[in-house]
Image (tube, rainbow, N blue to C red):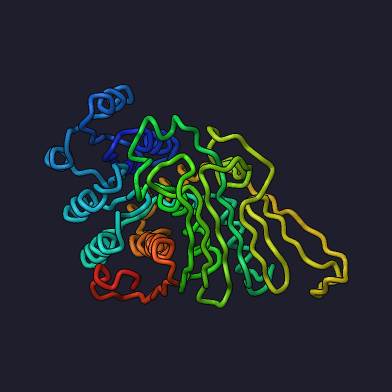
Amino acid sequence: MKKAISLAICGFGLVGQRHANAAAQVDGVEVAAAVEPSAEGQAKAAAMGLTCYATLDDLFAASSPDGLIVATPTPLHLENGLAAIGRNCPVLIEKPIATSVGAAATLVDASEAQGVPVLVGHHRRHNPLIHAARDLILAGEIGGIRTVNATCWFYKPDAYFDVAPWRKEPGAGPISVNLAHDIDLIRHLCGEVVSVFAQAAPSVRGYANEDVAAAVLTLENGAIATITVSDSVVAPWSWEMTSGENPIYPHTAESCYVIGGSDGALSIPDLRVWAHESGQPDWWTPIAAKTVATEPSDPLVNQIAHFRDVIANGAVPLVSAREGMRTLGVIEAIQTSAATGRSIQISTETSHNNPAAAEYNI
């Protein structure tokens, strides 16, 4: 019998525990250890039968895991990721990959220079709904993409902010906290973003960050995308409420993404493909939809299985460090545009020279 892939989880809060539960459902994988300084997290790790270390140095001094999952707060991602890369340990880093494009570029350079895989936890790409949507688009079911509309609306209760006051501060609004997944899916399904114009409004609750924002994105293929986000709107149109991905959110039979093409349109996550019945685009002829069926599965479990395959079989990461950096670059551009009122151009060259200085050369 082949030896199971041994994983360690750095950061054993709620997200780290979700990764541990997901890994328990993946054949050929075992979580052997956790890294967590808090007594509460250490108790949770012990309850799951895991050896727990206070620091990453302690972990690597005592063991050699086949892979590391980083589920610590974002400001620690750079330090934790570099520690794993320096020990030739493949690493899965929760999104966003880092606090800035410059920090992300440091991880990209280290990963590519040393040949150590770095994956980023944009787990929605591992959802069968997204696999099916991408297959439909690549198969030409809707023709060339012309426009995209994404909606990310929900209401976070006051208690969400009161238990973690940092959520009220600049940089912790829904642009950075929530849009990263949606922007990543726009890139994955529809193409690279080359320019951004955004606006944001101050929190109506009096917090120091925004609570509503909108952006117009120009894609490399010429398509125009619009995206809006708010955490102070009562609405059913968000990935959390429409996809059924996480049972803690109530499910609605709505869609949050609409992609318009020259031959048809696709709504997600209900996977309805709209086209004129004649087969020819013509607004005077009847239009109808077909729904594509998928077999549901947990994207977090799928992500761990993919991490196993990267480690054991040399599979190409679906969301590499460079992919994570590009998504973060779009988020930074949205924040900058909203703050300055300027349109921001984004370069997506595959090579970069000091992107910390050229902040949107991603």
Looking at the image, residue 155 sits to the left or right of residue 285; the answer is left
Q: Nearer the viewer, residue 89 or 242?
A: 242
Quadrant occupied by the C terminus: bottom left
Instruction: Give the mark count.
Output: 0
User: Residue drawn 19% across and 33% down?
Assistant: 53
Q: Can the viewer see residue 91? A: yes
User: Residue drawn 37% across and 40% down?
Assistant: 167
Q: Which quadrant of the view contains residue 118? A: bottom left
Q: Which quadrant of the view contains residue 251? A: top right
| Residue 283 x/y as whole percent | 83, 71
Q: Nearer the viewer, residue 111 or 272?
A: 272
| Residue 135 x/y as whole percent | 60, 63
User: Residue drawn 50% across and 63% down?
Assistant: 188
| Residue 194 x/y as whole percent | 46, 74
Outermost residue on the left side: it is 61
Q: Nearer the viewer, residue 131 or 274?
A: 274
Q: Can the viewer see residue 6? A: no
- Residue 319 vs 76, above or below: the answer is below
- Residue 11 vs 171, above or below: the answer is above
Quadrant occupied by the N terminus: top left
Q: Which quadrant of the view contains residue 322? A: bottom left
Looking at the image, residue 356 sits to the left or right of residue 159; the answer is left
User: Residue drawn 40% across and 52% down?
Assistant: 176
Q: Nearer the viewer, residue 132 or 201?
A: 201
